[in-house]
Amino acid sequence: MSPYRNLFSRKGSFSFTAAGFLARLPLSMYGISTVVMIATVRDSYALAGLVAGTSLLAAVLVVPRISRLIDRHGQSRVAVPATVFSVVFSVLQVACVRYGAPDWTLFATAVLSATAPNVGGMVRARWAEALKDEPDAMHTANALEQVLDEVGFIAGPILSVALCTTLFPEAGVLGASALTLGGTLLLTAQRRTEPPVHEPDAGQASSPLRNRGLQIMILTFLLTGAIFGSAELVTVAYTEALGHASSSGWALALLALGSAVAGLAFGALTVTVRQTTQFLIGVAAMAALMLPLLLADGLPSLAILMFVAGMATAPTMITGMTLVQQLVPAAQINEGMALAVTGLLGGNALGSAVAGRVVEWQGAETGYWIPCGAAVLALVAVLAGMRTLTRQVAASTGGTEGAEERQAMEQR
């Protein structure tokens, strides 16, 4: 654990990491809290699903633009008003549900509450600034952040359901809103570790979406998100078909647990293989470890296979986020990471939709073909773009591989 202890020897690092975790824990709470709230009060799962989907789609469109403003004006100047705006409309949505407002108000507040910034990207940007000359420490920091994401996706849904069922149906959304606001305020109050605003380089593209390497990463993340979204829906359907519907949460928690354990181990290693090769190996391993899910035959085997299937996820995401940081200039780091995250979110929604159709037509037993197929397509996308990724990362002035290459030339 010494690499992780070394991370927190830097002044302020524990404080901004803890605040960032509190602020992004609600990411895994809003969706399920919204569904439970609307389904319980309005007695309509169809309406609940549509409202939650609308909120997700709005976030995919809005969050990268919020991140662009953060790159241009700084975290505290943009994140605080954006978060306050989001929380206000989340609370208004709760009021609309509770007091019987028309259904269209739920969609309107879902769209308007989608301005909460990508806090995970903001924290990673702080690490990137603090560790810009320490690639091994940056590797460990990315691993830590990915593990915290996995912990959030284990704890968030459990906390949401507990709040909604033990207090009142709206408690999940209100609790998530409180965490979003409190965590973001705590994070942005730490001005000493806030990254400075970087001026764009001459000739730099106005949007990182024009970056060929980032385009490949977003496509890969879209397909990776489809793995997660389809696996989640199919697992719920499969456990229900087995007569153990309440076990779906634990099965999905094992997927995240396998990822978290592997992520912690990977973050403690010093890996000498170049980043692009690491990413290719990770995506290939993710595809290979998903395939055994097709052999699931009952709850015990499913639990084991889910844990194993998750073990390539965190290492792949750690390397992927490191590549994104290397591919985009410092002046676009928040927007670049937000685009990667929204790619995951969009893929999650796409995978869930496709898996739902397959489960309805062919039954839950065949549903695991969808995450397996998405994993294979992700591998194809990386293989097709490998040359471009390698060339761009090596040429990047801020990239680890470029720095190592220049250092080796100087030594020679």
Image: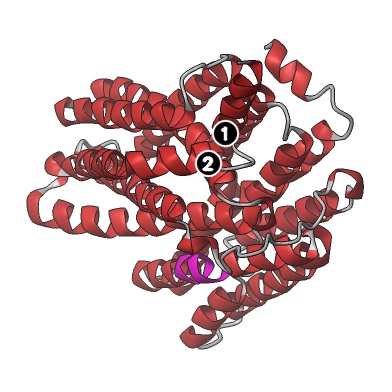
Residue at x 14%, y 39% (from the top left corner): 365
> Hey, which quadrant is residue 4 in on the image?
top right
- What residue lies at 81% left-to-right and 33% top-to-bottom? 13
User: Residue 310 in the image: x percent, y percent?
Assistant: 39, 28
Q: Secondary structure at mark 2?
A: helix
Q: Is residue 254 visible?
A: no
Going by the numbered disc 1, the residue's amino acid type is: Gly
Q: Horizontal and vertical percent for residue 380? A: 23, 41
State which region is magenta: 56-62
In the image, residue 311 lies in the stretch drawn in magenta: no
Number of numbered callouts drawn: 2
Q: Is residue 60 magenta?
A: yes
Please provide percent x and percent y for residue 161: 53, 48
Q: Is residue 149 left or right of residue 299?
A: right
Residue named by callout 2: 395
Q: CA distance from mark 2 to mark 1?
A: 6 Å
Q: Which residue is mark 1?
A: 402
Residue type beneath disc 2: Ala
State if disc 1 and disc 2 touch (CB < 8 Å): yes
Quarter placement of the N terminus: top right
Q: Could you tell me which secondary element the residue under label 1 belongs to?
A: helix
Please say if 362 is above or below 295. below
The residue lying furthest to the left in this view is: 362
Return the residue nearer the eye: 164 or 13: 13
Residue reaching furthest to the top: 2
